[in-house]
Image (cartoon, helix red, strand yellow):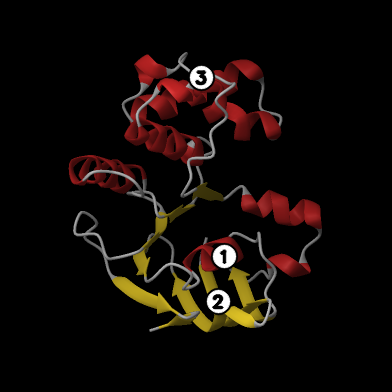
Amino acid sequence: MQLSTQALTVVRGRTPALDGVSLKLERGDHLQIHGPAGGGKTTLLKALAGLIRPSTGTVRWDALDPWALTSADRRAHQRHLGFVFQSDALFDSLTVEHNVRLPLERRGVPDDEARARAREALERVGLTAAALKRPESLSGGMRKRVGLARAVVTAPEVLLADDPFAGLDPDTEREMAALLLEVASARTLLVALPDPSPALPMPHRRLADGRLE
């Protein structure tokens, strides 16, 4: 899936969260977006994911405007996107495996298949042994890896990661970056970070005050 925006503006209150942002990601592209807190990084990722409607300008999934689709068709196309949240957004009342398979359950995937795919995703991030644990018992770095497994369990074409290294020490950041690059090797990848990460050898652009430099 190709992702693009053209003159994208998103207004929240009186100040644009995004101000005329134009961006194009071809299939397989890897890019870092970096900039200060409040600069619009999360808003851009959510707009690309079809979670926020633009005030003006356009978002395109290939040639499609997600907001011209019915809600059902937009949800169907969102299945091609995986999202890694800044806060891991895990449910501590569920096991690690159950957290990972939730996106599959919501799509009606049979239980046996969902469990098998969740275990496979956990194996890819090195957390097979934690499958039956509760997230609250895991370290911050391990919780981040669970979030990554959940984002890729649906085999998305595009991976959007919102500050996936937040709160991690340098060694754990490097480990997480290596996993991110591994699971995204055949995918389009857009990572939002406060500063460019040397652990992610890819092009980067700065987003500040809602404007992409």
Q: Are marks 2 and 1 in contact (CB under 8 Å)?
A: yes
Q: Quadrant of residue 17?
A: bottom right
Q: Is residue 181 above or below residue 207?
A: above
Image quarter in which the C terminus is found: bottom left
Q: Residue at x 61, y 30 (%)?
A: 102
Q: Relative to residue 158, is residue 180 drawn left or right?
A: left
The residues tagged by marks 2 and 3 sit, at their Cα atoms, a distance apart of: 36 Å
Do the CB atoms of the residues marked 2 and 3 lie less than 8 Å apart? no
**Picture mark count:** 3
Which residue in the protein does label 2 denote?
5
Q: Amino acid at mark 2?
A: Thr
Q: Nearer the viewer, residue 152 or 52?
A: 52
Q: Secondary structure at mark 1?
A: helix
Q: Earlier in the sequence, mark 1 or mark 3?
A: 1
Residue 160 x %, y %: 47, 55
Q: Secondary structure at mark 2?
A: strand
**Mark 1–mark 3 CB contact (< 8 Å):** no
Residue sitting at x 61%, y 82%: 15
What distance separates the C-alpha of mark 2 from that of mark 1? Answer: 8 Å
